[in-house]
Image (cartoon, rainbow, N blue to C red):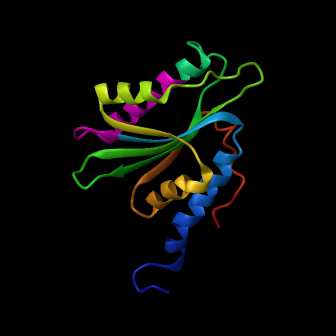
Amino acid sequence: MSLYAPDWFFKLPDAYGRFILSTFDRVQSRQKLYCTFTFRDFIHPESAYKAFKMAIHKWNREAYGVRYWKRKHGSVGFVALEYQRRGVIHFHSLVAFPEYPDRVPREVRRMDMVDWWFEKFGIARIFDYDPKLGASYYLGKYISKGGEVDWFGRTDILKPQLRLF
């Protein structure tokens, strides 16, 4: 037992990583992405989340069509917020484009998003998601670092199947 923090505090990032992994891996999708979005300059957290939502909206329009929201289609995933040493917000995200009974999404072009994000906000890196590389655990560690981890998209698709403890 630590003198500074209870034992559960050290187990929390791993438990949250398992939670993210079990939830995200259950999404039926042809395309899953691991993304990092870094802002060029200081930005308020609410504005940063709006920028992230704008990026997701752009992707949803590309994958599902202009009126994706009317048919309740759209991407799902997790996003973790952290502050870099220079005080700028940085996002890590797992994004999946689920297949719906009436719609199979078009594959999104990663480099188009990288270019768009660079033009508007800063630097983005987008990779195909590989569950063996530990991205879900990487997002889970932000819980103990004072960051935030949220999920987005249709919550009925991201039904948690694992309790944290």
Residue at left 45%, top 85%?
A: 2
Q: Position of residue 35 (x, y in %)?
A: 46, 41
Q: Is residue 150 above or below residue 11?
A: above
Q: Position of residue 31 (x, y in %)?
A: 62, 34
Residue at left 66%, top 49%?
A: 23
Asked whether 127 or 81 is in front, the reply is 127
Left or right of 115 in this view: 41: left
Instruction: State the predominant SS element of the stretch in magenta.
Output: helix
132 magenta-colored = no
Residue at left 44%, top 64%?
A: 144
Q: Quadrant of residue 162?
A: bottom right
Residue extending farthest top: 66
Q: Is residue 49 above or below residue 9?
A: above
Left or right of 144 in this view: 40: left
Left or right of 164 in this view: 124: left
Residue at left 70%, top 22%?
A: 104
Which residue range is magenta in the image?
Answer: 38-59
Number of on-image labels:
0
Q: Which quadrant does the C terminus fall into?
A: bottom right
58 magenta-colored = yes
Q: Position of residue 111 (x, y in %)?
A: 43, 28
Q: Position of residue 155 (x, y in %)?
A: 64, 38
